[in-house]
Amino acid sequence: MIQTPFTPQETPDVWDALDVLTDPVCRTLIRNLDHPMTAREIAVEFDILLSTTYRKLDRLTDTALITETTRLRLDGSHASQYMVAFDELHVRRTNDNELAVHISSIDHPANQLASIESAIAQDS
């Protein structure tokens, strides 16, 4: 069971979330992605192949550890950008011997702005 502020359709599998954390590239992204960046910016900044970057970002967004929003550009060629989506992740064993994961989401200005930009882009 994962407890998050996400809807049931967005809730990732516990084992998927834990598996992502065993991946060294995913951990690097989680540790260092402190502001919204595009996949290309991430690939350059962290010296990762672009194809690998997309695979890792897909895994991280599927497990709700990173959020994907839209970066609006004046020329109309908007781009996806990514940012860490949590402050804390807790794993515990429940009374029925299941694992439970609780993800505390980040609510800071960069995420709020990115959400507003995404909403505007979807309305366009």
Image: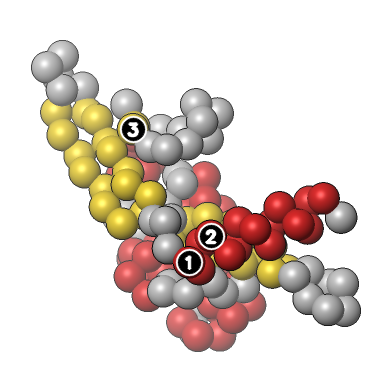
Give the image location of residue 120, x and y in percent. Answer: 76, 57
Name the front one of labels 3 and 2. Answer: 2
Tell me the CA gap for discs 1 and 3: 23 Å
Image point (43%, 72%), residue name: 33
Under tag 1, what secondary structure?
helix
Residue type (three-letter) at the residue carrying disc 2? Gln
Which residue bears the numbered disc 2?
112
**What colour scheme was applied to this rendering of the protein?**
secondary structure
Q: Which mark is residue 3?
A: 3
Q: Against 68, is 73 above or below?
A: below
Tell me where residue 57 appears, x and y as whole percent: 53, 59
Q: Is residue 12 above or below residue 35?
A: above
Q: Which residue is the site of mark 1?
A: 109
Q: Secondary structure at mark 2?
A: helix
| Tag 3 secondary structure | strand
Task: For the residues labelled 3 and 2, say whether their Cβ atoms are less than 8 Å apart.
Answer: no
What residue is rendered at 87% in x and 79% in y? 75
Mark in front: 1 vs 3: 1
Q: Mark 1–mark 2 contact, CB under 8 Å? A: yes
Can residue 100 be spotted in the picture?
yes
Contact? badges 1 and 3 (CB < 8 Å): no
Type of the residue with mark 3: Gln
Q: Residues within 10 Å of mark 2 (few under 14, many from 20)?
A: few
Alpha-carbon span between mark 1 and mark 2? 5 Å
